[in-house]
């Protein structure tokens, strides 16, 4: 990237002090602009309903507007760093805010509005001097929701466990939801990851072993109450529907009429993100964390090389390849274990008669292979300069508890409230099956009395790392997601707000760049190619510590970004006042 080459990794801004605020705070010399708040029109021609501040927009309106709870995102340049598509996830909803009277009444229309507030947005942005404008309308504008038709592709497509009453073929699915982090391919497509899908399915009182391993419990349905009006979310009636979620979904943002594809070759997981890089000979490598206590880190290597010609030329690339799960050994080395039918005990006797069985039951397969049970792997990112890979392990308070897995070298702290960032370097090219690993940092606050909460941060205290990106000049950006029930309390007493920090990974010093408003998490980050504009998301500002279903409570916590009315998730555009590269 010629625009940023030669700048090096140096960080030049002055650290932002940690204080309880209800605004976005950035260092001196930087400015912010809020765009695409929940409810703002997406920009579909002739269909751009304005947001109603009392949340009385209909379900149909919501399908044409920004969804809730912005998460992972990526910028796709259309004209260098001056115009592009921003594609972003809407992970989940707060029904207390989404409907005028919250969850006090419940109806099919509310379920439909909730389903429309999930998914993905494609919006067009244009730089206009120092500011950015959303292009309204835009021929690219699109909302993908929990009701958008999509196709299952790859080795598990059509598998008996994916067939339902509504889709006997096992290849056609309605929608994507709980889209957390993301990925961006070199052939111009967006990857959105389905994370906590189990929370949407009402389980049975007598779950089988598969349902238990994937967290399908009785009572889950109470959170979003979709099953009360959409029968497919009732596990007793439709036991296979949940197997059609937990995938990585590929979207072509350039073609609003394209059908999103769920790529089964990448395996099923409570997928957090999907970081894409290339081997020296041009094959795609996808690193994926599964955000679940004691679950796994995965890597996929494609069979084929990326071809010139964009999305159309690479339509089936992610359908053929090898999936691996990581084992992190005590001596600082590790191994990628192939999730391949017939290998390592993944045989018919154990329930793995086909590759589809392995991909749908990837957790059970990884258990058999002896992969390392991690502290909630969230985002992964690949350093473009060194090819080192980083992964946030956000926290795991169950580590070392009675009846739970003990500490290990990669997950070294019991009652791990603070989390850590692990990094590895492949032994050779990115398709290697062996690697060397260590910790970039154990997060924490040195003022804490409990040794395990202190961490070893050189610089500003933080905990619960989640969003992660090494930018084009090699600066590692870290975003935190301390849960609302913990922020400012207990071992987080000195950390009342979520934050974003920057790190030069060759030096290890970590410096606070941004604070978010009250009750939010900071997540999602992407930059223009010239690194002079950074986009981040503020998710769930004003989230209360309890009673999320009550419309009054979030209003009491935050009024961001409008200063009045309901708090709204939104994208924040960050630029330097002197027009320089972010972070220098
Ligand atoms: Fe949706 Fe693991 O964060
Ligand atoms: Ca996350
Ligand atoms: Ca998180
Ligand atoms: Ca969140």
Image (tube, rainbow, N blue to C red):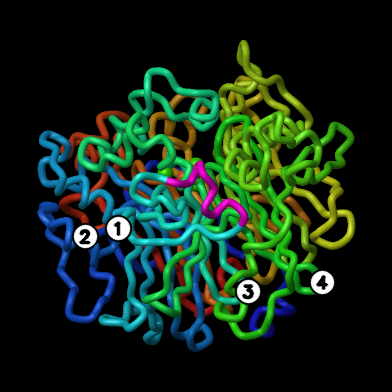
From mark 1 to mark 3, how far is it between C-alphas?
26 Å
Element type at marker 4? loop
* Relative to 114, 140 lies left or right: right
Q: Earlier in the sequence, mark 4 or mark 2?
A: 2
Estimate the spatial distance between the alpha carbons at disc 2 and disc 1, rounded to whole Å.
7 Å
- Quadrant that contains the C terminus: bottom right
For disc 4, the marked residue is 280
> Visible in this render: residue 525?
no
Image spot of residue 338 (x, y percent): 77, 46
| Residue furthest front as drawn | 168
Q: In the figure, residue 469 lies in which quadrant?
A: bottom right
Residue at 33 percent across and 24 percent down: it is: 219
Q: In which quarter of the image is the N terminus?
A: bottom right
Distance from Cα at disc 4 to Cα at disc 3:
14 Å
Q: Residue 186 carries which label?
A: 3
Q: Nearer the viewer, residue 102 or 483?
A: 102
Magenta stretch holds residue 158: yes
Kindly indicate whether the residue at mark 4 contacts the one at mark 1 (C-beta within 8 angstroms).
Answer: no
Rendering coords of residue 299 (x, y %) = 70, 52
Residue positioned 61% across, 20% down in the render: 449
Give the residue at x 13% y 41%: 107
Q: Horizontal placement of 551 versus 452: left or right?
A: left
Residue 246 in the image, given as x and y percentages of width and height: 50, 46
Q: How many residues crowd around disc 4 within 10 Å: few (fewer than 14), some, or many (20 or more)?
A: few
Are the residues flagged by discs 1 and 3 in contact, CB closer than 8 Å? no
> Would you name the residue on which mark 2 appears?
62
Mark 1 or 4, nearer chain start: 1
Helix or strand or loop: what does disc 1 sit on?
Answer: loop
Which residue in the protein does label 1 denote?
67
Q: Residues in magenta? A: 155-163
Q: Residue at x 26, y 82 (%)?
A: 137
Q: Is mark 3 on a helix, strand or loop?
A: loop
């Amino acid at each position: 990237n010629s625009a940023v080459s030669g700048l090096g990794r140096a960080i030049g801004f002055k650290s932002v002090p940690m204080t309880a605020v209800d605004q976005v705070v950035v260092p001196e010399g930087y400015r912010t602009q809020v765009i695409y708040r929940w409810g703002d029109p997406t920009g579909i021609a002739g269909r751009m309903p304005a947001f109603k501040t009392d949340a009385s927009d209909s379900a149909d309106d919501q399908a044409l507007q920004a969804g809730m709870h912005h998460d992972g995102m990526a910028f796709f340049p259309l004209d260098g760093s001056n115009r592009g598509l921003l594609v972003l996830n809407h992970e989940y909803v707060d029904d207390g805010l989404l409907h005028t009277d919250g969850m006090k009444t419940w109806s099919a229309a509310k379920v439909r509005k909730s389903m429309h507030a999930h998914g993905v947005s494609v919006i067009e942005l244009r730089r206009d001097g120092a500011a950015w404008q959303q292009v309204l309308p835009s021929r690219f504008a699109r909302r993908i929701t929990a009701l958008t038709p999509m196709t299952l592709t790859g080795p598990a497509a059509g598998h008996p466990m994916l067939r339902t009453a509504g889709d006997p073929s096992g290849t056609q699915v309605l929608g994507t939801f709980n889209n957390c982090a993301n990925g961006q391919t070199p052939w111009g497509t967006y990857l959105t990851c389905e994370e906590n899908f189990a929370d949407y399915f009402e389980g049975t009182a007598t779950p089988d072993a598969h349902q238990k391993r994937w967290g399908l419990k009785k009572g889950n349905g109470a959170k979003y109450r979709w099953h009360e009006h959409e029968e497919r979310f009732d596990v007793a009636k439709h036991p296979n529907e949940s197997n059609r979620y937990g995938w990585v979904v590929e979207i072509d943002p350039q073609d609003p009429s394209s059908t999103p594809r769920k790529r089964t070759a990448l395996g099923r997981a409570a997928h957090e993100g999907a970081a894409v890089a290339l081997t020296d000979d041009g094959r795609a490598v996808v690193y994926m964390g599964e955000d679940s206590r004691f679950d796994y880190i995965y890597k996929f290597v494609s069979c084929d090389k990326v071809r010139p010609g964009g999305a159309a030329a690479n339509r089936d690339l992610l359908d053929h390849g090898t999936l691996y799960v990581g084992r992190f050994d005590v001596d600082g080395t590790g191994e990628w274990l192939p999730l391949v039918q017939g290998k390592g005990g993944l045989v018919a006797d154990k329930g793995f008669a086909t590759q589809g069985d392995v991909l749908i039951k990837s957790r059970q397969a990884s258990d058999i292979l002896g992969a390392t049970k991690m502290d909630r792997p969230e985002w992964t990112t690949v350093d473009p300069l060194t090819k080192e890979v980083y992964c946030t392990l956000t926290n795991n308070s169950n580590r070392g508890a009675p009846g739970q897995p003990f500490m290990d070298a990669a997950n070294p702290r019991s009652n791990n409230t603070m989390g850590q960032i692990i990094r590895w370097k492949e032994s050779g090219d990115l398709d290697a099956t062996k690697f060397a690993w260590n910790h970039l940092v154990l997060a924490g606050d040195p003022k804490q009395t409990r040794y395990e909460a202190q961490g070893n941060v050189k610089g500003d205290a933080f905990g619960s790392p989640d969003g992660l990106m090494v930018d084009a000049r090699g600066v590692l950006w870290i975003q935190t997601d301390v849960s609302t029930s913990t922020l400012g309390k207990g071992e987080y007493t000195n950390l009342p707000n979520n934050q974003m920090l920057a790190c030069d990974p060759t030096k290890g010093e970590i410096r606070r760049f941004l604070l978010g408003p009250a009750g939010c998490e900071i997540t999602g980050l992407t930059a223009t190619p010239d690194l002079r504009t950074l986009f981040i998301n503020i998710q769930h500002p004003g989230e209360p510590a309890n009673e999320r279903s009550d419309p009054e409570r979030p209003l009491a916590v935050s009024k961001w970004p409008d200063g009045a009315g309901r708090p709204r998730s939104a994208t924040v555009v960050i630029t330097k006042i002197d027009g320089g590269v972010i972070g220098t």
